[in-house]
Image (spheres, rainbow, N blue to C red):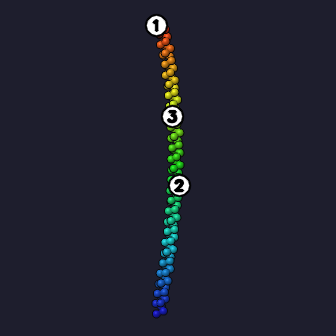
């Protein structure tokens, strides 16, 4: 009888120890998963910030290029206007000369 009590007690003790070991292992796994999720979340936030910074830099570059293109076009337009005014003046001078010669 005492042997069966020892066996039963050992079985209960083994089950209890097994249960607590399993609980400790599960808690450790859960903690590990939580840590991994936190790390991935931090990495994702950092990547998002990096992408945002790159996008802002690209936007600034595009804006700067647009301003430069606009300035170049304005210079071209002013140059063409100047040439047109010079030609008009030249043609008016020739017209005046021709009118004076014909009179």
Mark 1 to mark 3 CA distance (whole Å): 47 Å
The structure residue drawn at horizontal position 51% and vertical position 35%, both measured from the top left corner, is 69
Mark 2 Cα within 10 Å, few/some/many (few <14, many 20+)?
A: few
Q: Please name whichever residue, 80 or 35, is drawn nearer the observer in this view of the structure.
A: 80
Q: Position of residue 95 (x, y in %)?
A: 47, 13
Instruction: Name the residue tied to disc 2.
Output: 46
- Are the residues tagged 3 and 2 within 8 Å (C-beta)? no
Instruction: Name the residue tied to disc 1.
Output: 102
Instruction: Name the residue tied to disc 3.
Output: 70
Q: Position of residue 43 (x, y in %)?
A: 52, 57
Residue with the most extreme top position: 103
Height in image: 94 above or below 3? Answer: above
Q: Position of residue 102 (x, y in %)?
A: 46, 7
Q: Along the polypeptide, which appears first: circle 1 or circle 3?
A: 3
Single out the mark in the foreground, 3 or 2: 3
Q: Please name whichever residue, 26 or 100, is drawn nearer the observer in this view of the structure.
A: 100
Mark 3 to mark 2 CA distance (whole Å): 36 Å
Height in image: 16 above or below 86? Answer: below
Single out the mark in the foreground, 2 or 1: 1
């Amino acid at each position: 009888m005492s042997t069966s009590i020892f066996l039963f007690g050992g079985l209960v003790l083994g089950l209890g120890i097994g249960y607590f070991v399993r609980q400790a292992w599960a808690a450790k796994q859960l903690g590990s998963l939580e840590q991994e999720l936190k790390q991935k979340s931090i990495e994702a936030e950092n990547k998002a910030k990096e992408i945002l910074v790159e996008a802002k830099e690209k936007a600034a570059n595009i804006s700067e290029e647009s301003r430069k293109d606009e300035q170049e076009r304005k210079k071209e337009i002013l140059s063409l206007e100047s040439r047109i005014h010079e030609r008009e003046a030249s043609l008016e001078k020739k017209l005046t000369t021709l009118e004076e010669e014909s009179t």
